[in-house]
Image (spheres, helix red, strand yellow):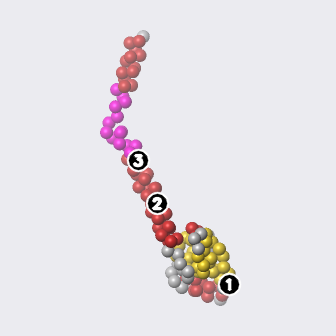
Amino acid sequence: MSFLISDAYAEVAGAQNPGLIEGLLPFAILAVFFVLFVWPQHKRGREHKKLIESLAKGTEVVTTGGIIGRIVEIDDNFVQLEVNDGVVIHVQRHAIASLMPKGTYKTRKKADNK
């Protein structure tokens, strides 16, 4: 009986030697995952951080909620956006999604008033 058990262990021990491809496959999957998912996300994060740092008074922006406005005041954490004549809202800095071309805010205001 012990003769059969030792044969089974010998077969399992022989099967534990993976080849080069089987040994590198998990690393290749991790590398593909990093290139497809992690790297682009970090790149977007760095670009958004640069955008937030470049904000200045008078810049026309769009928030993540889709509100278009012009920056009238800015501090470390919050931005005051003028969204219409005399209407100012407070928004967190990181809620700014993108910059608008100069003059977009004025043309939008003219279109709303017609």
Instruction: Name the residue nearer the viewer: 58 or 31.
Output: 58
Q: Secondary structure at mark 3?
A: helix
Question: Pointer 1: residues within 10 angstroms few (<14), some, or many (20+)?
Answer: few
Seen from this angle, which residue lies furthest top? 1
Q: Look at mark 2 in the image and give the residue it sits on.
A: 42
Q: Amino acid at mark 2?
A: His
* Residue 64 visible from this viewpoint: no
Give, as a three-letter code, the residue at label 3: Ile
Q: Using the rendered view, name the quadrant where residue 66 is placed.
A: bottom right
Quadrant position of the N terminus in the picture: top left
Q: Give percent across and percent down for residue 47.
A: 47, 67
Q: Position of residue 42 (x, y in %)?
A: 46, 60
- Residue at 62% across / 85% down in the picture? 109
Q: Classify mark 2: helix, strand or loop.
A: helix
Residue 17, placed above or below residue 24: above
Q: Residues within 10 Å of mark 2 (few under 14, many from 20)?
A: few
In the picture of the structure, the residue carrying the numbered disc 3 is 29
Identify the residue shown where x is 66% and y is 79%. 88
Q: Looking at this view, is 31 or 75 the one in front? A: 75
Q: Measure the C-alpha gap from mark 2 to mark 3.
A: 19 Å
> Tag 1: residue type?
Gly
Tell me which numbered mark, 2 or 1, is placed earlier along the sequence.
2
Q: Which residue is mark 1?
A: 86
